[in-house]
Amino acid sequence: MRQALQRTWQKRGTLALLLLPLAGIFFLLATLRRWLYHSGLLTSHRLPVPVVVIGNITVGGSGKTPLCLWLALCLSQTGRSPGIVSRGHGGNLPRGQVREVLTDANALEVGDEPLLLKRRSGLPVFVGRNRVAAAKALLAAHPECDLILSDDGLQHYRLARDVEIAVLDSRGLMNGWLLPAGPLREPAGRLDSFDALVLNGKTKAPVTHVPTFQMNLAGTTFYALADPTLTCEAAALRNQHTAAVAGIGAPQRFFDHLAALGLDFSTYIFPDHHRYTAADLSAIAADALLMTEKDAVKCTGLSNRPIWVLPITAQVDPSALGIDLAAHVKNRIVEKPHGRPPA
């Protein structure tokens, strides 16, 4: 169903047109909800520290988590002490609960992306459907934190924010229509209200006056899931019968990355945040499996075959005006009224 919709969203074809009335209803509801928060009829909760939200207005993975990790580390190097909150997609945390993510947490409980963020950054990470509650719990447990980064959550208006960053990948806005006729969670005009727009990969930049930054995802060295101290380069895998496994929002991006490294492999696509089982992996015909870190945190002990994991690191270039994104975020925190309601 998801793949069929994504094909539909590529253009303004017959099926998309048939879904347009539902998109009109979605627009009215989304606009009303945003207005209720902006007017104060629904409450946006302000935290005692600045909040930076990183997300997208399209459905599917766009590269938010790598950018969140990059920004967290950059801000840490400039003297800030960020903590990270996430909804915990893919986890099974009961509604109303929040939890700190530890390095030995179970990804099936806290979510794959929060566990990845914790292991890669070492920073405090809390998850919960209620990001306000998650952020308050984080600050109570780690009072040294002077900044909250929200991985996703642009539409979680209960959490007032000081800086909003939107990420677009190579798919762009596709047909430019709202759900379910198109991929947009919010109208395209919402891009003009963000503090920064980050383009992941070869992406056609939309017309906007917002400072725009180019991000690329880099990674060439694999590590063995069973023993992360064991690493290899792509050349060591070229003569093996390998299969690339992806349960992420944009699996083709991972496959393209592997192909650019000169690898030849079969592909296996699972739903985003898929809960892998031993049967899933045993059904794959290959001598070795290739995975993203997001998938790998859920696959320890599920296969006796080698599983090679490719860590990805974001690289963000300065804007056309020479502005550094991390410095831009710090400046916007100083310039803006603390805890602004959503645009």
Image (cartoon, grey):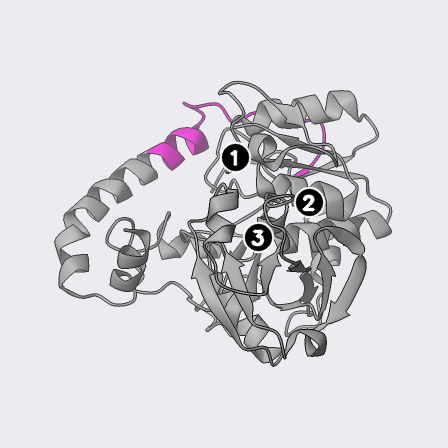
* Badge 2 density bin: few <14, some 14–19, many ≥20, Cα 10 Å: many
Q: Position of residue 322 (x, y in %)?
A: 71, 72
Q: Classify mark 1: residues with Cα within 10 Å, few (<14), some (14-19) or many (20+).
A: many
The residue labelled by disc 2 is 117
Question: Mark 2 or mark 1: which is in front?
Answer: 2
Tell which circle, 2 or 1, labels the residue nearer the N-terminal end. 2
Looking at the picture, does residue 343 appear above or below residue 193? above
The amino acid at mark 3 is Lys
Residue identifier under label 3: 64
Residue 273 visible? The answer is no
The answer to which image quadrant residue 127 occupies is top right
Nearer the observer, disc 3 or disc 1? 3
Mark 3 vs mark 1: which is more N-terminal? 3
Q: For this view, does 234 lie left or right of residue 146?
A: left
Q: What is the three-letter code of the residue carrying label 1?
A: Pro
SS under mark 3: helix
The percent coordinates of residue 181 (x first, y second) are 23, 54
**What is the x, y in percent for residue 281?**
51, 51
User: Circle 1 is placed at which residue position?
Assistant: 341
Q: Which residues are magenta?
A: 33-51
Nearer-the-camera pick, 232 or 209: 232
Element type at marker 2?
helix
Disc 2 marks a residue whose amino acid type is Leu
**Along the line of sight, the residue nearer the viewer: 107 or 99:** 107
Q: Is residue 47 part of the magenta span, yes or no?
A: yes
Q: Residue at x 32, y 59 (%)?
A: 6
Among the 4 quarters of the image, the one containing residue 151: top right
Q: The residue tagged with tag 1: helix, strand or loop?
A: loop
Q: Residue at x 32, y 52 (%)?
A: 2
Nearest the eye: 214 or 28: 214
